[in-house]
Every structure is written in structure tokens, then in C-alpha cells.
Image: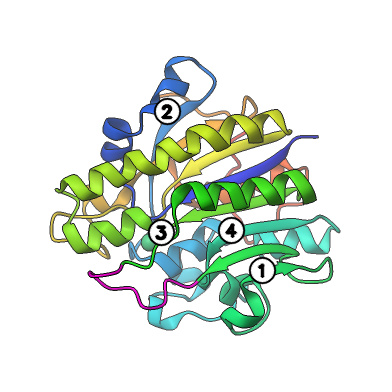
Amino acid sequence: MRKICLIIIDGLRNDTALAECGFLTASTEAKTARHWKMISCLPTISAPLYETLHTGLAPSDHGITSNEALRPSNRPNVFSELKQAGRATGAVAHSYFHTLYGGSAFDPFDHNEIDDPSASVPHARYYSLEGYGRANPALPSEVDLCAQAWAIAHRKAPDYLLLHSSSCDTLGHFYTSDSAEYRTQAWRVDNALSRLVPRLVGAGYDVLVTADHGMNADGHHGGDQPGLREVPFFAFCDRVKAPIDAVLDQRAIAPTVLALLRADVPDTMTAKPLL
Ligand SMILES: [Zn+2]
């Protein structure tokens, strides 16, 4: 059975993905991937939507409604359901994901690298962005993140692997969505993915690429604007099915991941899997 890698490009608008991400759009032209527009839940904020992407619940239903309200997930989620089913997971992601799914408060000295089969997320590499500011955005290189994801996939082969990139969000905040910096970074992420995705596919992974939310021309996100709610969804996976002109619901991702892995979908995930 094929494994699943979910790639979240934080803060990437759908229109920017289509305009800048030449590898992803070339893959749709070549029919190795398909693209849909997806609508994110509200508020269009990172921590609430990380939880939405993994629980299939809107923030008003899972209870994490702001970044300041970040806490461990207390709803059935992709990581917990796979753990219960005896399946392995992995992540290369911002430290918020450790707080949500890692089972303890994040400490960079304890949790930067985790390889522990008994851990909630057994194979993980977390980055903190500590010191983040305009003079030093404290971002990992995209290709380094991709290489870390590849190392986990290649050596540990978890059934579910999350790769989360923060850089479009960070540069969007500093320079706005209407900037060469934001648009160029979208391409940089895509350019790094062009080296990772074919390897993952060759190693038995189906790959899904999306964003938590978009970005606006004020360098902000949180509200209900098309540039904030319309995010890309690319599927390198023949088993994902939806009418090609459909506009998809972000809450469908969690049950789709579990269904693709032939794991039980909990009753709390009410959106229909995209199968
Ligand atoms: Zn975000």
C-alpha cells in the first residue's frame, strides 16, 4: 500500500501557487498531478488550521481559534488515529506541530530531532524560528527541509509524513503578498519540491500539497477574503477523486489521508473523503 506525504506550504495563496510554482503546475500539465482550488476554514490563522488539516474540524469545532490558544490537540486527528492503529508517522515542521501532536511542551533541546518508536510522532524534526524578525527571518532553507523529509522517508518509511514549510508565510508578513519577495519564495519552495516529490513518489509515497491559508496585500491573514481562503490542493495520487472544477473543503484532507491509508475514519471527521 502506498504511503502518504502531506506538504503544507504555510501562507501560500492559490493564485500565487498557479502563477509561480512551475514544478507543481508542470506536473498538472503532465498529468502526474491534479490541482483543485480549496477553501480554508475561518479564522485564516496558522495554528487553528494546522489542527483543521489534521482533525477535519473547523476551528469553532476543535476549539483552537488563535495562535495564542495553541495547546495539545484533544480531538481525534491523523497522528493519533494512526498511532492507535499501530502505524508510524513522521514530521518535518514548525514546533507548533510538536505542541499539537507531540505529547509535551516543545523544548528545542529535547525535541529538535525525535526518533523514538514509542513517541506520539515517532520520527520528527522540528524548527522553532526562534529569533524571527525582519533582519533575520530565522528560516530553514527549503532544500534542507526537503532533505530532512527525504531522510525520514528513506530511512524510516512512516505511513504518514508531514512536511511543513513556513517561509512563504514569513516573507508574506514582512513584504506582503504583493511583493517580489513573497512571489519568489513561493517559487523557491516549489523549486525545492521539484527535487523531493519525484523521490517520494519513487519511494512509494502519494503526495498531497496544500496551504493552511493565504496572505493579503497588508502582509496579514486571519479574515475572510478570497486571497486568504483560497489555497491550492495538488494531488500526486490517482486515488484522489473529485470533479476537476470542484472547489474543495479543507476539512476533507484529514479523512482523505486516513482513507488513503485504509485506516478507520473517526465519526468526528464528517467531510467526505476525496476518493
Ligand atoms: Zn500559517
Q: Earlier in the sequence, mark 2 or mark 1?
A: 2
Q: Is residue 23 above or below residue 58?
A: above
**In this rendering, position of residue 138 left or right of residue 83:** left
Q: Give the extent of the magenta segment.
A: 128-136
Disc 3 versus disc 1: nearer the observer: 1
Tags 2 and 1 touching, CB below 8 Å: no
Which quadrant is the N terminus positioned in?
A: top right
Q: Earlier in the sequence, mark 2 or mark 4?
A: 2
Residue under numbered circle 3: 166
Cα–Cα span, label 1 and label 4: 9 Å
| Secondary structure type for disc 1 | strand
Residue under numbered circle 4: 92
Q: Which mark is residue 113?
A: 1
Query: Foreground: 112 or 14?
Result: 112
Residue under numbered circle 2: 23
Residue at the spot x=63%, y=58% of the render?
91
Cα–Cα span, label 3 and label 2: 19 Å
Residue 132 lies within the magenta run:
yes
Residue 64 lies within the magenta run:
no
Residue furthest to the top? 30
Spot occupied by residue 140 in the image (x, y as percentages of width and height)? 45, 59
Q: Quadrant of residue 150?
A: top right
**Label 2 C-beta lies within 8 Å of the nearest ligand 1 atom:** no
Residue at the spot x=64%, y=76% of the render?
111
Label 4 crowd (10 A; few <14 / some 14-19 / many >=20):
many
Disc 2 versus disc 1: nearer the observer: 1
Label 1 crowd (10 A; few <14 / some 14-19 / many >=20):
some
Residue furthest to the right? 86
Q: Earlier in the sequence, mark 3 or mark 2?
A: 2
**Label 3 C-beta lies within 8 Å of the nearest ligand 1 atom:** yes
Please, what is the three-letter code of the amino acid marked with disc 3? Ser
